[in-house]
Every structure is written in C-alpha cells, then in structure tokens.
Image (cartoon, rainbow, N blue to C red):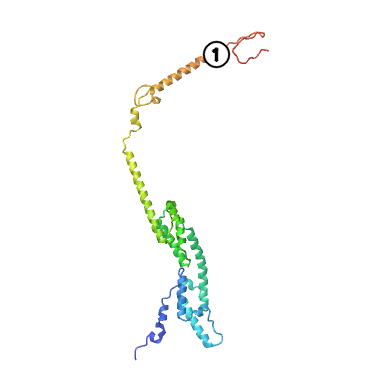
Amino acid sequence: MGPAPSSAQLCPKLNSPNIESEKVLIQLNGENYSRWRFEIEAVLEARDCLDVVSGETTCPQKDESEIKAWKKRDALARSIISRSLDDFHHAFIRSCKTSKEMMNCIVRIKEQATVSSNLLVSSEFHAYTWKPGMNVASFIAGLNVIVSKMQSLQIELDDEIIIGKVIQCLPSDFDSFRQSWRLSAPKAVTLSDLTSQLLACESDQLCRSMQAVSIGEALVGKRTTSKEPNENSKKRNIECWNCKKKGHIRSECRSQRKLNSSTLKDRTKSLNRTGFVARSWLDVRQEPNDRWLADSGAFKHITRN
C-alpha cells in the first residue's frame, strides 16, 4: 500500500492563500474598531461576500441552486466575522442568523460606544490644564495622549487648535512668552516648533532662577562676615549726659532713676502739706442774719434769707 494522502491532498482548499490570510485576521477589541472594520470589509470583498453582508444581495426565493450558493457565501461571511471577534464581542452575535445581522449588531454597539467615547475624550481635551509640578515636557506629553485618543476615534484636530490650547494653558511664568507669541506668531507653525521654543524659554527661566539664588547666597555670606559694629559695641562708646559715664544713655541711667524717685516723693509730701494747710483755714462760726460779707473771694453767693 502506498502512503496515506495528506490533509492538503484531501482538501486542497485548506492551504489556499485566502485561508492562510484569514488565519491572521485582526480581532476586534475596545480600541481598534475603525481598523477592524476596514480590514474585515477588505477580506469580505476579497472572498466575494461583502454584498451579502451589506444586504445588497438578498437570499433568492425560488431557485434552490441560487439559494444554496447564497447560503454558502453567507456562511463564509459569518465565519470571517466570527473569527475576528474577541470573547466579549462574540457574545453579542451568537443569536444572529445571517452575516448581515452579525455586522449590524457589531456596528450598532460600537457606533453607540464611539459617540460616548467622543464626548468623553472631547471633554477631557477641553478640561486639560497645567497642574502644579508640571513642566513643558510633561504637559505636552499628557496633551499628546489625549490627541492620540481623539485621532483613534476619527476626531481630527488642526494644529492651530492644539497650539491654541497649549498657549491658553501656560502658567503665569510664561506671560511674556504668551504675549510675544500673540504679537508675532508665525503663520506656519507646528506643535513641535512650539514645544522647542517653550523648552528653550523654560531653560532660560531655570538659569535665571539659579543665578538669583547664587546672588542671594553671596549677599547673605557677605552680610555674616561684615565687620560692622553691633548695638552693644556702639553703646560702649556712648557717654551718659547725667552721670558722664560710658556704656549707657540718660534714660537708662541709674542715678537719674534715683533722682526721679526722690523728686516724686518730695512732690507727694508737698501735696499732703498743702492739703493740711487748706483744712487749717476752715472756720465755722455763726453770723447774724443781717450781716453782709464784703469780698469773700467766692464766685457764687447765697443769701441767708
């Protein structure tokens, strides 16, 4: 007996170029819908069954041979679509009967999700700002991530919109750069050109801040090593006007304090004596009702009757 025939000899269509190309079909996931649809439509057209999936060619009603041929093409399309889906998306098409139903189901799910994704990523783009601790490189990198998301969802942004977003979000340290850019912005500019200019401006700011710090440290060092006399050394050469001694001023003089204290005591004693004298002049006596006092020194007078 001769050797047994191989699988290629029994089914020569298995090793055809079309079968080999379908083994590497792209699988649909949550981020590659646009590319998946483009490649699947190309494969379906190459296998002559895209018109069945799109609904242009419907199933015949009478001729059995035509019905059989159409079902064969539809089965091929269903096989291609099914093998291009991951487990998550495959669960949605298991109840579909034709390739057209399968494709419509996937398109409906992904298109609705795409609208929501467009709204989310657009909101993310407009809400993106310069946060504390960011520099030019980190800010541009975060913005590029959002722009890449928008491009994957077929949302096209002009360079002018992206550049305007960057200029708007710059912090106050870049006010001079923002003003000069608005006054003399070149007509044809790319995001790469703007990024290089911002990096150069940031580098200049860093150099100026380092120079300011070094100058401040030099001034502090010079201040600490200065030989200017302090307050204590100045007081050593001051002569008091009261006691004629050095080392203090008149307000701090102990002799002056003693003199002020004794003067205050003398004034207190004098006031006490004055009060006693005033009381000693008090005279209480009874006068007749018909007698008048002439020039008593009082500024108000009350008669007896």
Question: 177 and 297: which one is in front?
Answer: 177
**Residue that protrudes farthest toward the bottom in the picture:** 1
Whole-percent x and y of residue 67?
A: 53, 85
Question: Which residue is outermost to the right?
Answer: 305
Asked whether, in this view, residue 2 is left or right of residue 265, the answer is: left
| Quadrant of the snapshot with the C terminus | top right
Where does the image place residue 184, in percent across and percent down from the top left? 43, 56
Q: Which corner quadrant of the image does residue 244 belong to?
A: top left
Amino acid on which the number 1 mark rests in the picture:
Arg
Judged left or right of residue 253, residue 268 is: right
What number of labels is visible? 1
Where is residue 240? Give x, y as percent. Answer: 37, 24
Task: In the rendered view, tell whether residue 114 sits above or below residue 277.
Answer: below
Describe the element under mark 1 as helix, strand or loop.
helix
Question: What crowding class fits label 1: few (fewer than 14 Cα within 10 Å), some (14-19), or many (20 or more)?
Answer: few
Along the viewing direction, whichever of 112 and 203 lies nearer the viewer: 203
Residue name at image x 52 percent, y 13 percent: 277
Q: Give the residue pinned by disc 1.
A: 279
Where residue 226 sits, quadrant-wise, is top left
Q: Nearer the viewer, residue 285 or 1?
A: 285
Q: Is residue 279 above or below residue 246?
A: above
Can the viewer see residue 85 in this picture?
Answer: no
Residue 34 appearing in the image: yes
Q: Dividing the image into 4 quarters, which one contains the N terminus?
A: bottom left
Q: Which of 252 and 207 is in front in this view?
A: 207
Residue placed at 46% from the left, 74% from the top? 38
Coordinates of residue 139 in the picture (x, y in percent): 42, 57
